[in-house]
Amino acid sequence: MKESQKKYRDALEHAKQEFAKRSFAKILELSGTAPYDESSLILPYGGEHYRVWYPEGEISPCEDITDQILILQYLTEVCGVQPTGRWISFRELPGGNNHYGAFKLEAMDPIAEHFGNSPEKFESICHMLKGKKLAMGDIAYAIEVLPKLELALILWLADDEWPAKANLLYDATASMHLNTEGLEVMAINLVEKMIAKAASL
């Protein structure tokens, strides 16, 4: 097994162990998710709905191991606080400045590259994700990626003088629900899903 695969498998096993330590009732209460039955729940994430079994931590349908880890970490860490509507940059998250280069490359730049000349596709996908329009940039939407965890996607369109650019902001409460690494993965995976959806439009 490759080193990276082992790293992810180990992280998934750890996430499952931590998930099982939290009571099912507490998970439902703090995440605001709906129980499917006595040992599973339904979680909206990135525009889809996933069934999560407790205490096993199995998730269906979910093939991406980084999504599996993220979902379990979220259900383990979520604290129940509602978004405030005050936006902060990735740099303002704990330790975010250290990872900003990778975040810009993997989350911000792809939004600009894929949607900077396609505002209709950007808006269509944000609508699919039940985004709420924001008065920022040329086009901006707030998207609830996970319950209580909102991400603002801001796009400045390309013109004759300037290339397109994008920014992603977090609600000020984000770090109360997930650590910075998890918040980074959440944004990158959402952008990847948006680009995949755009390819089918």
Image (spheres, rainbow, N blue to C red):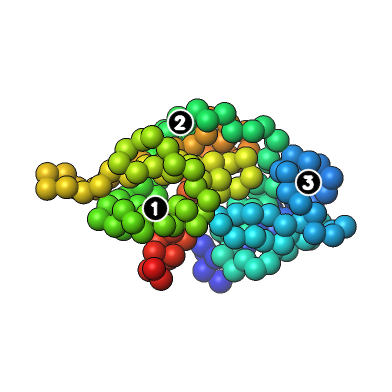
Q: Secondary structure at mark 2?
A: strand
Whichever of callouts 1 and 3 sits on the residue coming sooner in the sequence is 3
Visible residue check, residue 183: no
- Relative to 170, is 108 above or below? below
In this rendered view, identify the residue nearer to me: 103 or 86: 86
Q: Secondary structure at mark 3?
A: helix
Q: Of the residues shown, which amino acid type is indicated by label 1?
A: Glu
- Relative to 79, is 12 above or below? below
Answer left or right for 13 relative to 89: right
Which residue appears at 72% of the width and 62% of the height?
Answer: 51
Answer left or right for 185 relative to 112: right
Q: Of the residues shown, which amino acid type is indicated by label 2?
A: Ile
Q: Which residue is mark 2?
A: 88
In this rendered view, identify the residue nearer to me: 70 or 152: 152
Answer left or right for 94 relative to 70: left
Percent x, y for residue 52? 73, 59
Q: Which residue is mark 3?
A: 28
